Image: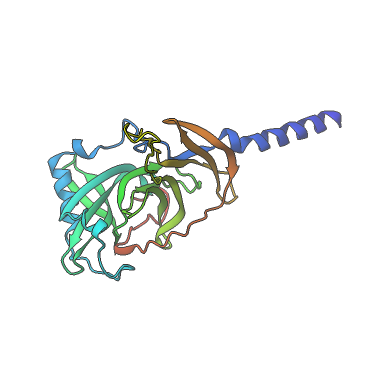
Amino acid sequence: MRAFLVLALTAAFMSNGFGQENKTLIADGTADVPKKYALQPAVENLPAAETEAVKKAALEKDVEFDSERKAMSSEESLFRKDFELLDAAEGFFIYREAEFRAYLYTAYSRKMRRNYHGIVVLKILENHTKFVVAAHYVYEFRGDRYLRPLPDINGNVLSELAIFSEPPAKKGFRKYVRIVEFSPASGLEKIDFRKIYTLIPQKQRMPRSADKSKPAKIVYTPPEAEAIKLYVVKDLGKPLKFYEEGWRINDGVWQITKELQLRPAELEDKTVYVELFKPVFPRGPGEK
């Protein structure tokens, strides 16, 4: 009986510590650029044929959809480009038996007279000579810049995607991460949305000097910068749990301000993903 009690207590202890030991870093708001692992594709190193295939797939249709913003702001207009391939990621996005490549891009719609974003997924065949569209979604411009694969955080054998954005703003500067996944049911499923970085310029006070013959010393007030590190803990059969660490810049150095704590999402991902090509998932194991 005593031995059984010891085993039960040990199992409980391991279970309680399991989540913290197996937490996965999803986004680091203190980093200038989201970490990209060495084996992940870099846009600047892609073969010309692959880049051209992405562009062809992206511009195959003249995109038009309802936008929340009726007119393009002056800040958004600074990002106008006919087409730009922003980033690429590789993972098991459609099924586990084969890797696919997802590409983040921005393009200009002449029908809407504004830029928009798109994510297109290609299956690469025949030694990088054949490219087949596996999924394609477009949505209104959000200042997206980076795309990173996630290692199946919800345990359904598929890789998720983290989309990092730096949307234009009149005051301050912010970074966000959206987590999505391709789904047999909905085509594309939203998983989470967080603000991971905020920089707010501070009002600069006019210097004063009691001695009018001497120039006053200008004292610069640096902007306030805050960030979070976002982690996820996966327990089989249970909903995902997201944890945040708070960080702040002090004298140019990032310092932790809030310990790791469970935090539900405070923002709602209102991105409307318009489906141009729905992914086709295998009907059973081993099917390709």
Depicted 260 relative to depicted 115: above or below: above
Residue at image point 32% right, 61% down: 278
Q: Residue at x 30, y 45 (%)?
A: 100
Which colouring convention does the figure follow? rainbow
Q: Residue at x 48, y 49 (%)?
A: 156
Looking at the image, is 78 positioned above or below residue 65? Answer: above
In screen coordinates, is 216 left or right of 10? left
Quarter occupied by residue 99: top left
Please state which of residues 279 and 139 is positioned toward the viewer in this rendering: 139
The x, y position of residue 202, in whole percent, is 41, 45
- Visible in this render: residue 151? no
User: Quick check: can you spot residue 90?
Assistant: yes
x, y (%) of residue 206?
A: 37, 43
In the rendered image, which quarter contains the N terminus? top right
Provide residue 136's location: percent of width, then percent of height: 28, 58
Residue lying farthest to the right in this orientation: 1
Foreground pick, 164 / 18: 164
- The x and y percentages for residue 87 are 27, 44
Is residue 279 shown left or right of residue 80?
A: right
* Residue at image coords 36%, 53%: 171
Give the tally of numbered discs: 0
